[in-house]
Image: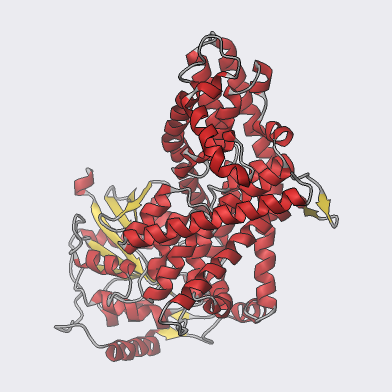
Amino acid sequence: MSAAAAIRLALVGNPNCGKTALFNLLTGSRQKVANYAGVTVERKEGRFHAPSGKHYAVLDLPGAYSLHAASLDEAVTRDLCRGFYPGEPAPDVIVCVVDATNLRLHLRFALEVRELGKPMVLAVNMMDAARRRGIEVDLAVLERELGVPVVATVAVQRHGARELVAKLDTMTAALHEPHAQLPDHARPPADLHAETRRLLALAVAMPRRTAEVDDALDRWLLHPVLGLLSLAVVMFLIFQAVYAWATPLMDLIEAGTGALGGWVGGALPPGPLNSLLVDGIIAGLGGVIVFLPQILILFAFILALEESGYLPRAAFLLDRMMSKAGLSGRSFIPLLSSFACAIPGIMATRSIQDPRDRLATIMVAPLMTCSARLPVYALLIGALIPQRQVAGILNLQGLVLFALYAAGILSALAVSWVMKKWRRDQGEHALMLELPSYRIPHPRDLLIGLWERAWIFLRRVGGIILALTILLWFLLSFPGAPTGAIGPAIDYSFAGRIGHAMTAVFAPLGFNWQICIALIPGMAAREVAVSSLATVYALSAADDTAAAQALTPIISSTWSLATALSLLVWFIYAPQCLSTLATIKRETNSWRQVGIATGYLFALAYLASLLTYQVAVALGAG
C-alpha cells in the first residue's frame, strides 16, 4: 500500500502514560525523527503492517495534559488532532493512551480528546502494572460510558498491542465518530473533573491511590538529605562508568582506524590523495568515532533514568536549590538533556510555562557538558591525567571528568543567579509536577533510543565533520612551502598562517598555534576540534613514523599540564557550536539573546582559561 493510502494514526496522551513505548512496540525500527515545519517540536513517525495486510502510519504526538494549550508542545498536539496544523494531514484515527494506574489524571484528558468528535480508540496502557497493584478496570463499562472503543495494552510486552491492532482493523473498515452525546462547545474544567470522578466510580476499583513500592522508594529518594545524596551518587557513578566501561571498545576502534590508515597509506603512492585519505579523512574522522562508546554509555544512563520515572523526582528535589538561582525544578530535565546535546535541551524548555524561567534555562543550557565536549575531555584527560585508583576504588580520570561536569553545573547556577538579580521579577514561581510510578526501563526502548542517537552522531561525522576535515586538510596542505624554505611546510599553509596570527590573542591562555587552528572548525561542532588536532599533528609531523602515532602520546609529550587544563576550562564555557546558537535564535526569536549568550560565554571562557593557565604555571605545571 502506498504512503498516501496508509491509514494515519495519531498517538496522544499525558506525559508518562507509556505512549512512546507503545509507539516503539508498534513500529520498531521503522521510525524517522524530524521537527514539525516552522517549530522546534520533535516529530516522530513510524509505520507498521497489521496481520490483516493494512498499512498504518503512526504519529507519536508530544505529550499534553490538556488541549487548552499552555505550551508549544500542547499547541502542536491540539492543532494536529483537529486537522488544523499546516502541512500535516488530519489523522484518520486518534489513539488516546492512558495509564491504568493513574486514570484519575489521564481520563480527564481523554474526555477532552473525545470532545473533538474524531474517530478514537482509548488504549488503557500498563494493565499488567495495574493488576499487580490490585487495580481493577472494567473496560466494558468504560466503553459504554465513553462511547468509544476501549482496549487494554501492555506496551512492554511483545504482543501487548495485539488487541489494539485488531480493534483498529475493524474500526478502519468503517470509520465512525464517537456516539456519545457531545456538547456543542468545550466543557468547563469543573464538568470534566466531575465526569472523571463519575467514570472512576463506575469502572475502577483501586485499593490505594499510590503503589506501596513507590511510597517506599519515595521515602528515601525524595528525602531532603538522603534524596540529594542519592542523586549525587547516581550522577557520580555515571561518569565513572563512562570511562571504565568504554575503554575496551575505544581501544578496539582505535586499533581498527590505525590499521586502516596504515593499509591505505601503504596501498597508495605518496602524494596529495594519500595525504587526504590518511592524514585528513581517516585521522580526522577516526579521532572522533573512537569516542562513540563513551557517548552511548552516557545516553544509556540518561534514557534509563528517564524511562524509570526518576527524573521528575530529581526535578522535585532540586527545585528549592534551583529557585535560589532563578530557575525552577522544571529546568532540571532540559538541563539534564543538555548533557547529551544543548539543542534538544533548549528545545525541551517549551515545557516551562513561565517565560522568565524558560529564558534563564535557555541561556544557561550551553554550560551543561554536552556529548560533543566529551571527545575533547577524553582526549586531554587520557593524555595528561594518569590512570590510577583513588582510595582503592575510584578512577582518577573519572574524578576529573566529574569535576568538569560539576564546574559546568555550578557555573550555570551562578549565571542564572546573576540573571535573576538583573531582572525585575525576582519572585519564586511554584512548581507543579506529576510524579509517575517507578518502572523498569524496557530494553527495546533503550536500544531504539541509543540507535537513534548513534545514527545522529554518525551522520554528523559523515556530514559536517567530514566536510570540515577535508576543508581543514586543504588549508593545512596548501600552498606548499616555497623553494628553499627551512621551516615545516605547514607553517606556510593558509591554516598555519591563521594559527600563528591567532597566538597573539590566545598565548596568555597557553594555547599553541595548533590549538588555535583547531578552534576555528570547532565553531561548527565542538567535537571537530579533536579531528582537527589529529589532522594538524599528522601533517606537521617530522616523519612518517611520527605521523602514524596516536594523538594522545603526541599531546602528552608536547603540551604542558597548564595548557591542557586551560583548554579543558575553555571548553566548559566557549559557545563553539553554531547549531546551538541557531536554536537559541529559533526558540527566543531574538538576535539580541543570541548576542548576549555568545558574548557572555566567550568572556567566561577567556577569563576562566586565563586564570587557570596562569595559576597552573605559578604552581609549577607550566
| Residue 363 visible from this viewpoint | yes
Given residues 454 and 55, the one toward you in this image is 454
Residue 512, image quadrant: top right
| Residue 152 visible from this viewpoint | no
Given residues 252 and 254, the one toward you in this image is 254
At a point 54% along the width and 26% down the height, the residue shown is 282
Residue 264, image quadrant: top right
Q: Which residue lies furthest to the front in this view?
A: 504
At a point 68% along the width and 61% down the height, the residue shown is 236
Work out whether 520 lies above or below 51. Answer: above
At a point 60% along the width and 66% down the height, the residue shown is 410
Residue 349 coordinates in the image, percent (x, y): 41, 66
Q: In which quarter of the image is the C terminus?
A: top right
At a point 42% along the width and 46% down the height, the residue shown is 29
Residue 104 coordinates in the image, percent (x, y): 41, 83
Classify residue 117 as left or right of residue 598.
left
Q: In which quarter of the image is the N terminus?
A: top left
Residue 269 coordinates in the image, percent (x, y): 54, 8
